[in-house]
Amino acid sequence: MSDPVFFRPSRPLTAAEIADLVGGKVVSGDAGVEIRGIAPIGDAGPGEVTFLDNTRYIEELRRTRAAACICAPKFAALAPEGVTIVTAASPYRAAALVTQALFPSATRLTGQFEQPGVHPGAHVHPEARLEDNVTVEPGAVIGPRAEIGRGTVVCSNAVIGHDVRIGRDCYVGPAASILFALIGNRVTIHPGARIGQDGFGFAMGPGGHLKVPQVGRVVIQDDVEIGANTTIDRGSNRDTIIGEGTKIDNLVQIGHNVVIGRHCVIVAHVGISGSSRLGDFVALGGQAGISGHLTIGSGAQVAGHSGVADDVPAGERWMGTPAVPLRQHLREVRTLRKLAAADKDTGENT
């Protein structure tokens, strides 16, 4: 259930407007019913829309008190009388579109100030260049020759280093730091993220470990989202690159020289070691670890908790530690279970 204090709806939507928005259809109920909020299927009440995307919640659909429900056509007849049904090909995606429309501030994070401008409590170097309609909250620091595009928000206590470039309509969350980086448009950087610091590079030897200067940059393309407390090291001798549309969860570590393709999804606690390359539309499950200098092909998927020590071909699904193709991993697990069961039986019979 949305909180009207933190997330205020822009205006109510009718069920008919929702159907138009999501490319769906009102198949039953009142197409003019007004929707002011969205809630889970078991909690929704009057004035709220819900959605069904997982069959385990079918019984809750039968009892829902929501004003409207978005679901696949095959489930439309299961809702109670009086619930307006909007059918859509992808109810989860449709619900996301409706939430964006109802609560635009939840997607476009604009900080606490309704009007753009530089707060007197911020420090913007005289040589920094800000386009119109940039918001800089108190405590933020923007270094010399930094450039920030129109519509971008820099929240309290964020630090933008010298010569950094940030595009238009970006969001830099509280206490984030950005150094030695070039950032595109519509990039969201959540609180506490660290971008552009030294990569971990040392020439080891018996006399001590010699630090290798990190002289590359971080390049973040358009429409990327970077989660809270995620770290992205700058390159050592080439750039660390995050491709267009990639979504990175909280607490992810990305090492120096890593290149990540377009529209990848990287879930929390993933670690990607230096100089590895990910193709487009790669998905890495939570706590997966990628060794250095590897290539993960486009469309590949790596399951959570996996440890990848070899290149993953494009389009394949790998799992386990060390990670292997999914079917091979499942065969290995079944074989081990059979061996363990046989060993147990032998031990009990002797």
Image (cartoon, rainbow, N blue to C red):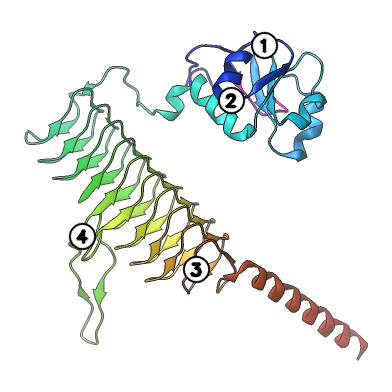
| Amino acid on which the number 1 mark rests in the picture | Ala
Q: Nearer the viewer, mark 1 or mark 2?
A: 2
Which residue is denoted by mark 3 in the rendering?
312
Q: Amino acid at mark 3?
A: Val
Question: Which residue matches tag 2?
Answer: 23
Q: Secondary structure at mark 4?
A: loop
Rendered image quadrant of residue 209: bottom left
Q: Disc 4 vs disc 2: which is toward the camera?
A: 2
Q: Earlier in the sequence, mark 4 or mark 2?
A: 2
Q: Position of residue 69 (x, y in %)?
A: 69, 23
Which callout, 3 or 4, points to the residue nearer the camera? Answer: 3
The alpha-carbon separation of the residues under discs 1 and 2 comes to 14 Å
Q: Which residue, given by chain and number where applicable, does mark 4 sit on?
A: 216
Going by the picture, which residue comes out furthest to the bottom?
350
From the top left corner, tell me how far across and down residue 102 is, in percent.
51, 19
Q: Residue 335: percent from the left, percent from the top?
A: 75, 78
Task: Identify the disc placed on residue 31.
Answer: 1
Of the two numbered discs 3 and 1 on the same chain, state the one appearing first in sequence: 1
Give the residue displayed 29% in from the left and 37% down from the top. Answer: 185
Is label 1 in a helix, a strand or a loop?
A: loop
